[in-house]
């Protein structure tokens, strides 16, 4: 897709950073299940931790297409780094920027965008995954503050996060109606990490189960309207899904580019395997799925920039890009044969990393529900 000059600038910056700073550490990040602090500091220094935050709040002042491009380029070499940036920007910063009061924006955004504080989003619970509205974490009204208690599951950035957007019920309903959103500082007494998940992929990205035991949250930290928290969650996930689609695209591109180069060098039957039509057909389909993913992601990012409705397009972008990434990484291993199945070659990491894009921020089945419901409403 043809990009305007200003988008090419951010693409070049993010690509250079990804190739020079992230790629050399990608395998180590996967093996050690840790993104080094030095990388995170450099993500801040380059403005990647506050891509679309206006400069007045300490951000880089760019837009949502810039943001998608940054996540894509980082994920091309390391999906763990891609999702650290994506969850932080999409799921913690965006709802504060969009639903926060001026005081909340002034208080939290500079720390998140350029001050080194990582953000997370606490919606899922052990018994509330796809059915997010059935969460049971409760925020007790205690006069000038709330006390939040409950357990949150699968929290990306949960180990490092200092600021969290937390969803809890303020009325004991059995559906989404009593949910409110809060900004919580994780150093508050009563916040603890119960466990860190050992996962198939994105191993450098922390995924925590978090307990809240009467965590005191001042009343002014209510985010958005009282008991309209489910709307905050759903609107936030619309944007988050673009970020995960961009992560899937980056993973797919990384795997494709590796397989393409490998096919030119690997000689079998007396010539490079890229001369074999069986291999060419796989490469052709991979390339086409990447191009289609890119169009869907960039289109939904541009719609978001223009404040047009993008819920349907974001779900389509995530559904398509995630399933394409899973397919492309599978074929990348196929092109690389036995070598591709070993840890000496990066394609098995891309394959493991791709799977989560079909699951988090709404499974592919949830995306299909969102798409069908949008189409049926037309
Ligand atoms: N924007 C704003 N509001 C929305 C909305 C949107 N996109 N979609 C729905 N709503 C509102 C509706 O208007 C309705 O509100 P009102 O009653 O006030 O009008 C309310 O939300 C309920 O809507 P539905 O009846 O459509 O909701 P539902 O209960 O049937 O749920 C669902 C639909 C699509 C399955 C939804 O629950 C969902 O998206 N589930 C998946 C949750 C998810 O993505 N979880 C991932 C968590 S984050 C993560 O992965 C971890 C991480 O850290 C990366």
Image (spheres, rainbow, N blue to C red):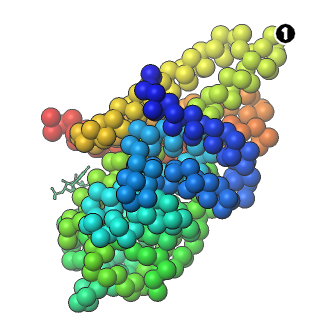
Q: Position of residue 142 (x, y in %)?
A: 26, 89
Farthest residue in the front direction? Answer: 56
Spot the residue most to the left: 378
* Mark 1 CB within 8 Å of ligand 1: no
Q: Nearer the viewer, residue 213 or 104?
A: 104
Residue 223 horizontal side relative to residue 57, left or right: left
Q: The C terminus appears in which quarter of the rendering? A: top left
User: Looking at the image, can residue 92 be seen?
Assistant: no
Residue furthest toward the right? 270
Determine which residue is flagged by label 1.
270
In the picture shown, does residue 220 fall above or below 248? below
Number of numbered markers: 1
Ligand 1: image quarter? bottom left
- Compare residues 358 and 64 and report the one nearer the observer: 64
Camera-side residue of 19 and 213: 19
Q: In which quarter of the image is residue 276?
A: top right
Residue drawn at the location 29% of the way across and 36% of the way down: 303
Give the percent coordinates (x, y) of residue 215. Answer: 40, 84
- At 26% from the left and 61% from the top, the residue drawn is 99
| Residue 15 image position (x, y, % from top left) | 60, 37
Against 132, residue 192 (above or below) is below
Residue 74 location, quadrant? top right
Q: In which quarter of the image is the N terminus?
A: top left
Residue at 44% in and 40% down: 66
């Amino acid at each position: 897709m043809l990009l305007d000059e200003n988008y090419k600038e951010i693409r070049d910056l993010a690509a250079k950073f990804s190739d020079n700073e992230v790629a050399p550490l990608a395998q180590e990040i996967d093996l050690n299940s840790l993104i080094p602090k030095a990388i995170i500091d450099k993500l801040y220094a380059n403005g990647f931790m506050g891509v679309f935050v206006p400069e007045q709040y300490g951000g880089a002042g760019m837009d949502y297409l810039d943001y998608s491009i940054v996540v894509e380029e980082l994920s091309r070499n390391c999906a763990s780094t891609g999702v650290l940036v994506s969850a932080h920007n999409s799921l913690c910063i965006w709802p504060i920027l969009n639903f926060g009061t001026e005081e909340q924006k002034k208080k939290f955004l500079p720390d998140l965008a350029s001050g080194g504080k990582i953000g997370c989003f606490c919606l899922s619970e052990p018994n509330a995954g796809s059915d997010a509205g059935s969460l049971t974490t409760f925020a007790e009204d205690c006069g000038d503050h709330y006390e939040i208690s409950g357990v949150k599951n699968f929290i990306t950035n949960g180990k490092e996060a200092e600021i969290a957007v937390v969803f809890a019920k303020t009325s004991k309903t059995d559906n989404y109606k009593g949910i409110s959103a809060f900004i919580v500082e994780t150093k508050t007494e009563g916040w603890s990490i119960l466990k860190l998940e050992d996962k198939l992929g994105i191993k450098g990205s922390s995924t925590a189960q978090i307990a809240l035991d009467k965590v005191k949250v001042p009343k002014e930290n209510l985010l958005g309207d009282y008991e309209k928290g489910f709307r905050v969650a759903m609107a936030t996930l619309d944007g988050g899904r673009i970020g995960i689609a961009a992560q899937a695209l980056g993973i797919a591109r990384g795997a494709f580019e590796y397989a393409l180069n490998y096919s030119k060098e690997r000689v079998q039957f007396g010539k490079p395997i890229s001369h074999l039509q069986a291999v060419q057909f796989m490469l052709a389909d991979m390339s086409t799925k990447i191009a289609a993913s890119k169009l869907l992601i960039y289109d939904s990012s541009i719609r978001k920039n223009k404040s047009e409705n993008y819920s349907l397009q974001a779900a389509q972008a995530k559904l398509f890009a995630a399933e394409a990434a899973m397919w492309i990484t599978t074929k990348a291993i196929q092109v690389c044969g036995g070598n591709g199945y070993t840890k000496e070659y990066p394609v098995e990491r891309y394959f493991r990393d791709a799977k989560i894009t079909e699951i988090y921020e709404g499974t592919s089945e949830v995306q299909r529900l969102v798409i069908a419901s949008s189409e049926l409403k037309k």
